[in-house]
Structures are given as structure tokens and as C-alpha cells.
């Protein structure tokens, strides 16, 4: 496939964990992947790893919490690629399960929102002109059942812990609905995906987390939806989740 027909995907927070694995799985499907990371060394190392696996991956530095970094990247994409087909808002921080809501450090809450919620919002706004040049625009917001009102371990079952993370993901779900409605007529499909408890850190597999490729597969599913696929939904493993 040439430059004009090969699909281009951008993944945020992709130097490790689910983001890195999503890059791998997308690149294995022949997609040109822009692997982004806020730390240049970590991003270049991750990219090298995928290049050695024979995959087509390009590294770009990106801090989703920083307007300037986002704008710089989008300018480069505009010049080098001219469009974007798939945006995966994966970067996420601060699983603050030990922080009580009533004594929460509000600076920490603000920082968490700036990455988990505004990072996805900022990226979607900035990339929109490039996504609109695609025939198959897809936006995937990597969310969490922790931000859901329904389901086990959701907001109604958490007590007062996990405030910054869970509320940031609830807001990310709301953002997904809003943006999907605003883009309803464009053909750009926008969905939120929960990867489920996934073993991205040592020791978590022993606690029941599933293998990283399994968690990543549901994110890739939403990136590869056909044109008549769903938009404005919340999914895990390709199946709808209640909000
Ligand atoms: N793993 C799970 O069980 C699970 C469950 C539900 C949802 N999720 C969601 O899935 C996503 C990925 O999770 P994960 O487990 O793979 O997490 P992870 O291993 O901690 O990776 C998070 C990635 O985001 C990057 N990042 C953080 N802040 C950033 C910023 N401002 N700009 C750009 N990149 C930034 C990190 O970079 P650094 O390495 O530089 O910190 C890292 O590459 C997150 O949104 C998470 O909330 C995960």
C-alpha cells in the first residue's frame, strides 16, 4: 500500500503498557503507527523494539497535558502525513485508590484531569482537521469501568476512594458521548473502551489482571470498526458496557 491508502494511527502514552501493545497490534495489521510518549528516551526505546519486530512505527514526542506539545505534534503530522485515520487517547495517570475524596489533594485531582480528561479532549480538538481528511476516522478513548455508574467496581461500589481517577474516567465517558454526537454526520466514530484489569505492572497478574495483549485487543477493535460500526458507546472486548 502506498502513502495515500495506508491507514495512519496515533497512540498517546505508548512507551509502555497497553499503549505500546496497541501500537504493536495495529502495526501488525499493516497500519502506519505513530507511537508517542512524553519521555523521548522511553519512546525511542519502545519504537526500536517494534521496529526490530519488523513493524512500521514512527516515534513522536507528545505530552498530552501540554498545549504546546500537542500543537507541535499536529503541525508535524499535517506536514508529514496530511491526515490521521485513528486517534487512540490512551495516556492515563494516577490510580489513587488510597486517596479519600473528602481529603483529596485538589492539585493532584487537577493534574489527573489534565491528562486523563483534557488530554483526550485537547488531542481530539487538535487532530480534528486531520481526522476530517480521513475516509475512516476513528477516535478511541481508553477509559475504565472505574468511571462507570454501573457494573462491579464502578462509582456506586467504590466508596470514597479513587476520586481523581474514577471521576476523570466518568468525565471521559461523558466527553465521548458529547464528541460522538457532535461528529455524528461526519463518519468519524468515537467510542470509549475499558481494557479491564490488565497486567501492565509487575505483581498485578498475580492479583488477577489479564495479559496485556488481551486488554489491548478491545482497544484495537474500536480502532478498526467498519464504517457502519457503533459510535458514542462504551465497550469492553467489543461488547457494550453500561455507563
Ligand atoms: N491497566 C489496567 O488495568 C487498566 C484498566 C482500565 C483502564 N486502564 C487505562 O488504560 C490506559 C493505559 O493504562 P496502562 O495500564 O497501560 O498504564 P501505564 O502502563 O501506566 O501507561 C500509561 C502511559 O501513559 C503515559 N502518560 C502519562 N501521562 C502522560 C502525558 N501527560 N502525556 C503523554 N503520555 C502520558 C505514560 O508515560 P510515562 O511512562 O512517561 O509515565 C505511559 O506511557 C490508561 O488510560 C488507563 O487508565 C488501564
Image (cartoon, rainbow, N blue to C red):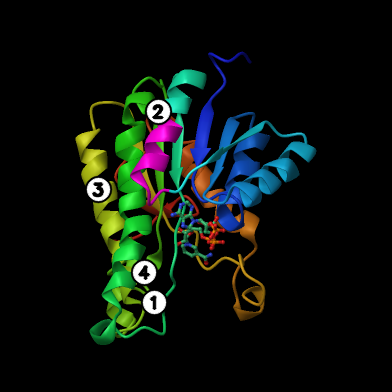
Q: Closer to the camera, 90 or 80?
A: 80
- Residue at coordinates 27% horizontally, 86% vertically from top-left? 103
Find numbered disc 4 in the image and state the secondary structure of the residue it sits on. helix
Residue 72 is a magenta residue:
yes
Q: Main secondary structure of the magenta part?
A: helix
Q: Closer to the camera, 7 or 11?
A: 11
Of mark 2 and mark 4, the one earlier in the sequence is: 4
Location of mark 1 (residue): 153
Location of mark 2 (residue): 227
Which of label 2 and label 1 is nearer to you?
A: 1
Of mark 4 and mark 1, the one earlier in the sequence is: 1
Q: Residues within 10 Å of mark 2 (few under 14, many from 20)?
A: some
| Quadrant in which residue 150 is drawn | bottom left
In the image, the segment drawn in magenta is 64-74
Q: Kindly identify which numbered label has been placed on residue 177.
A: 3
Classify the position of the N terminus by image quarter.
top right
Which of label 3 and label 4 is nearer to you?
A: 4
Of mark 2 and mark 1, the one earlier in the sequence is: 1
- Residue at coordinates 35% horizontally, 48% vertically from top-left? 120
Amino acid at each position: 500500500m502506498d502513502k495515500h491508502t495506508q491507514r495512519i494511527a496515533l497512540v498517546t502514552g505508548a512507551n509502555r503498557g497497553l499503549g505500546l501493545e496497541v501500537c504493536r497490534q495495529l502495526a501488525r495489521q499493516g497500519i502506519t503507527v505513530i507511537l508517542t510518549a512524553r519521555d523521548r528516551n522511553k519512546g525511542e526505546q519502545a519504537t526500536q523494539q517494534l521496529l526490530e519486530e519488523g513493524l512500521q512505527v514512527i516515534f513522536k514526542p507528545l505530552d498530552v497535558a501540554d498545549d504546546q506539545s500537542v500543537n507541535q505534534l499536529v503541525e508535524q503530522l499535517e506536514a508529514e502525513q496530511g491526515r490521521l485515520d485513528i486517534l487512540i487517547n490512551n495516556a492515563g495517570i494516577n490510580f489513587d485508590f488510597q486517596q479519600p475524596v473528602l481529603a483529596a489533594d485538589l492539585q493532584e485531582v487537577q493534574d489527573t484531569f489534565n491528562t486523563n480528561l483534557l488530554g483526550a479532549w485537547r488531542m481530539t480538538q487538535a487532530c480534528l482537521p486531520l481526522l476530517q481528511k480521513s475516509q475512516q476516522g476513528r477516535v478511541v478513548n481508553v477509559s475504565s469501568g472505574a468511571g462507570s455508574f454501573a457494573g462491579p467496581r464502578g462509582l456506586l461500589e467504590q466508596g470514597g476512594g479513587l476520586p481523581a481517577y474514577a471521576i476523570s474516567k466518568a468525565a471521559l465517558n461523558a466527553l465521548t458521548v458529547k464528541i460522538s454526537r457532535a461528529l455524528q454526520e461526519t463518519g468519524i466514530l468515537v467510542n470509549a473502551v475499558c481494557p479491564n484489569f490488565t497486567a501492565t505492572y509487575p505483581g498485578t497478574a498475580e492479583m488477577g489482571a489479564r495479559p496485556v495483549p488481551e486488554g489491548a485487543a478491545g482497544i484495537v477493535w474500536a480502532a478498526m470498526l467498519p464504517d457502519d460500526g457503533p459510535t458514542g458507546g462504551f465497550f469492553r472486548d467489543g461488547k457494550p458496557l453500561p455507563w
